[in-house]
Image: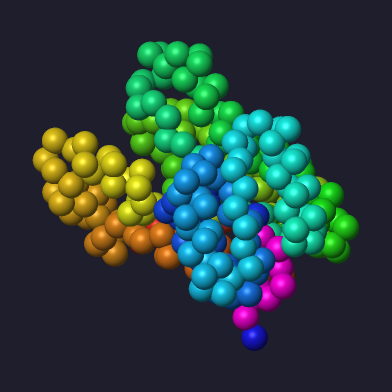
Amino acid sequence: MPRVADKVAIVTGGAHGIGLATCRILAREGAKVAVTDIDRAEGESQTDALVRDGATAGFWQLNVAEESQVERVFREVRDAFGPVTVLVNNAGIAGVDKPTHEIELEEWEQLMAVNVRGTFLCTKHAIPQMRAAGGGSIVNLSSIYGMISDANLPPYHASKGAVRLMAKTDALLYAADGIRVNSVHPAFIWTPLVEQMAQEDSEGPEAYRRRVGALHPIGKIGEPDDIAYGILYLASDEAKFVTGSELVIDGGYTAR
């Protein structure tokens, strides 16, 4: 039997990278999948491909930082597929790479609006549907940099620490409703964001991939499916006793 049969899943940032891999795996394992992303063209294209492969899926354009959009999309998903029982808070941006004292307020707030406010708003509007359905699973995409840090990207690191603690708090708040909330912590994953960083590297993309891969004891950068399979586990009933936890998928990065 498929691992998430008949569950209704919303994946934010679902048109690219980890979000897209998650949509594909959830759909293959039986979920009805709402692909949401700010990128309409790619989102529609990828959703059409899922449907051609036999999935029950739909695309909704969504800016997770805008509550009116979140409220409307979640309502429309419920009307199309039924109450949401899986939410993957994946949408996020990297933001500026400056030391803290050089960051403009607008730059800080732009990142927090997507990474933190977006996670809050989507969780807020998923909870009533999950209560009505008798339970559900929420997965917040954090990062290894929600657990440790580095001397770069201060707003990003702060945001990923926030969504980690948000998962723990919501796990406590909604456990009695049968709603599980966990966070996933990837290391470097070969997504369009990391690929862009590689393309901009002074030594070239292949040198970047080797150099960054070597930071992981396993010896390489991860792939989106490595994270998506972890999300699938947390979304499934296999993880029925897992809440308030961090799933670290990092090639050994944080074991050093």
Q: Which residues are magenta?
A: 2-9
Image quarter where the C terminus lies is: bottom left
**In the image, 140: left or right of 137?**
left
Magenta: main secondary structure equals loop
Most extreme residue toward the bottom is 1
Q: Which colour assignment does the render follow?
A: rainbow
The image quarter containing residue 201 is: top left
Image quarter where the N terminus lies is: bottom right
Magenta span contains residue 4: yes
Q: How many marks?
A: 0
Between 137 and 154, the residue placed more toward the observer is: 137
Between 67 and 112, the residue placed more toward the observer is: 67
Can residue 146 be seen?
Answer: no
Magenta span contains residue 109: no
Residue 22, image x, y percentages:
52, 61
Residue placed at 56% from the left, 74% from the top? 54
Residue 4, image x, y percentages:
65, 73
Can residue 40 be seen?
Answer: yes
Residue placed at 71% from the left, 68% from the top? 7
Residue placed at 15% from the left, 51% from the top? 206
The image quarter containing residue 95 is: top left
Residue 11, image x, y percentages:
60, 53
**In the image, 137: left or right of 92?**
right
Residue placed at 61% from the left, 40% from the top? 62
Residue 247, image x, y percentages:
54, 59
